[in-house]
Amino acid sequence: MSDSDETPSASPKFDFSAYPRDTLFHERRTGQDRRDPTDSPPAEPGERRIKKDRRRRIDPTTFEKQYTEDELEFMNAMQRFKVQSGKPFPTHGEVLRVAISLGYRRVVIDDDPDADQQTEP
């Protein structure tokens, strides 16, 4: 280590003559310098530039959630459907068919029970 902590201003030239004539060299330094601070906004102190994939795959709404028996039954039925059909992303109709196969039915609530009866003036 030298007394100066500065980087040398000029690097030694690469000697191409030290290699056979048919050697292929690929110059990777011709593009834009990725370390150039002018092309990207400065990062906030203490903030990472790139988020990890591992954290992105965790759904914060379901992390450490206690599921009800009905939710577990539906999730397991959907997983069975995906495995049997080979479809990782079922359509809305297929999701409804799985729910109906579990016994779920739409409940129609009649707000006005007298609406069906017609009264004569």
Image (spheres, rainbow, N blue to C red):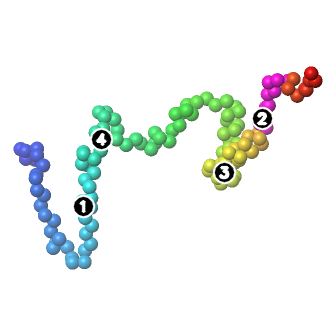
Q: Residue at x 37, y 43 (%)?
A: 50
Which of the two discs, 3 and 2, labels the residue nearer the N terminus?
3
Q: Which residue is mark 2?
A: 106
Which sits in the foreground, 70 or 43?
43
Q: Residue at x 51, y 38 (%)?
A: 58
**Mark pair 1, 4: CA separation:** 23 Å
Asked which quadrant contains residue 118, the reply is top right
In this picture, which residue range is highlighted in magenta? 103-113
Q: Residue at x 15, y 73 (%)?
A: 17
Number of the front mark, 3 or 2: 2
Q: Which residue is mark 3?
A: 83
The residue tagged with tag 3: helix, strand or loop? helix
Q: Position of residue 64 (x, y in %)?
A: 55, 31
Number of the front mark, 4 or 3: 4
**Left or right: 115 as drawn, with respect to 120:** left
In the displayed structure, 101 sits above or below 68; it is below
Examine the residues drawn in magenta and state their main secondary structure: loop
Q: State the mark number for residue 30.
A: 1
At label 2, the amino acid type is: Arg
Q: Are marks 3 and 2 in contact (CB under 8 Å)?
A: no
Q: Which residue is mark 4?
A: 41
The residue tagged with tag 1: helix, strand or loop? loop
Which of the two discs, 1 and 3, labels the residue nearer the N terminus?
1
At label 4, the amino acid type is: Pro
At label 3, the amino acid type is: Val
Q: Position of residue 69 (x, y in %)?
A: 70, 31
Q: Are marks 1 and 3 in contact (CB under 8 Å)?
A: no
At label 1, the amino acid type is: Thr
Number of the front mark, 1 or 3: 1
The residue tagged with tag 2: helix, strand or loop? loop
Q: Position of residue 23 (x, y in %)?
A: 25, 74
